[in-house]
Image (cartoon, rainbow, N blue to C red):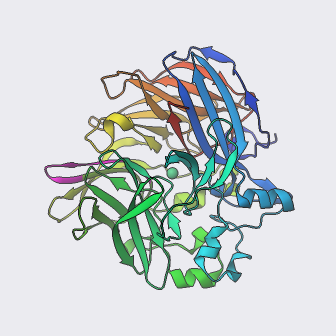
Amino acid sequence: MTAKGFQQGFTSLNRETHYEALPVRGSIPPWLSGTLIRNGPAKFDVGSETVHHWFDGFAMLHAFTFRHGAVAYTNRFLRSKSYSEAARTGKLSFSAFAADPCRVIFSRFFSVLFAHADNANVNIARIADRFVALTETPLPIEFNPRTLETIGPFVYDDRLAGSLTSAHPLYDPTNNAAINYTLRFNIVSSYHVYMTRGRRRKRIGVLPVAEPAYMHSFAATTRYVILAEFPFMVHPVKFLLTGKPFIENFRWRPERGTRFLVFDKECQEPMQVYESEAFFSFHHVNAYENDAGLVLDCVAYPDPSIIHQLYLHRVREAEQMPTGILRRYHLPRNGGKVRSEQLASAGLELPQINESQARSRPYRFAYGVGADQPINFLNHLVKVDVERGERQVWSEAGCFPGEPVFVPTPGGQREDDGVLLSVVLDAERGTSFLLVLDAASFTELGRAEVPHHIPFGFHGFFFNDV
Ligand code: CO
């Protein structure tokens, strides 16, 4: 491997392996039983070509299975059509986030354009008791959670068409359903918010939009779904004609401000729209209702320049990059002016919470990856007390952690009773390890060492029955 430092996290891992028991240092809590499945790009080079953007690497699934303090590890590439085609031809020929569009401009319809972009490298979910890899095209790919073998496209049993979606569905315990939205490109485009039960999606709100925005995730309270529509917008017809890579068609229009589009899950009441200053975000952290209205927390950036900062040639050159800040937006109950505040001074990304206790409720702790300025890449794990603005940090020299997934201690009472699981790149050794951190004290309990590096991934999910 020629790359040094954190840049190793942006180099390909071509090997598919299975280890029954990784070497463990420290101790893994014996109560921790289940499988963490993570998703992320792992192959950046095909033949003599390299993908342009981090987000365009081919998806690899990683499974860490915990039983009685031991940890097994398996990894497999997702056999999407685009992966198989690249493997067969030795060429990059499919449309992706920032990929070469030369094939795409001859496709007259978006359905055709995106039908090929099935490289589901962003997240993992369980839909209709199937395990699927997700990306921002509505084309989930099903896999076997034990072997990580690809089963094939997951097909919904409905006619809800869309061109783009979010890879961050939210579970709605009231309705035992998953909430998500899809953007339908057309002469008049529209956002469709829906609930998934089994294989069927039921639409709960629709809004026509002249120039749709790029929205990576969204928020939900017990009753409402909130799309934060940042002014990073695309003109659908121009999109068809320019032939530019997907994300380069979006334009930053700060003069338009950010709109919060509020949909009611329980009835078809008219939606409420709030406006605030322009900002950009990938990730919402949490949202809830209180007497004053709606509260929405997200990781905010002043503009979307972070997307351009994540082109491979830029991250590999270790340019400085912007850091997201945890911000809270207050949407007053009967309309009116949106107020916002910064919840912590330190940066945060890939935010996580204790889903079972904190989702859609007033809460105290957000976890994520962070780095102190000036930064070139995220180099610590952070726990933010959103009530007090205080933080705790875990870091180790030369180590670069990924998204920390929270697993609650069985019977735990406090919100931070549990562990955080994070895949960490040890750049000195050129290998990665799975770190188990006590969420309350923010100290290491143990680690399981993988004999090779794991490229930086995006998101994962812990399943206690796998
Ligand atoms: Co994401």
Residue 174 place in picture, x, y as percent: 29, 47
Q: Residue at x 55, y 48 (%)?
A: 123
The majority secondary structure of the magenta stretch comes to strand
Asked whether, in this view, residue 238 is left or right of residue 441, the answer is right
227 or 269, which is in the foreground? 269
In the figure, residue 215 lies in which quadrant?
bottom left
Whether 118 is among the magenta residues is no
Q: Would residue 385 appear left or right of 6 to someone viewing this image? A: left
Taking the spot 72% from the left edge, 67% from the top edge, the residue there is: 94
Residue 229 appears in the picture as rendered: no
Q: How many marks?
A: 0
Viewport quadrant of the N terminus: top right
From the top left corner, tell me how far across and down residue 96 is, in percent.
65, 65
Q: Position of residue 12 (x, y in %)?
A: 76, 46
Q: Position of residue 396 (x, y in %)?
A: 58, 26
386 is higher (above) or lower (below) than 211: above
Q: Residue at x 45, y 50 (%)?
A: 324
Quadrant placement of the C terminus = top right
Q: Out of 20 and 233, give the one closest to the viewer.
A: 20
Asked where in the image residue 37 lies, by quadrant, the reply is: top right
- Span colored in magenta: 283-294
- Does the magenta portion include 290? yes
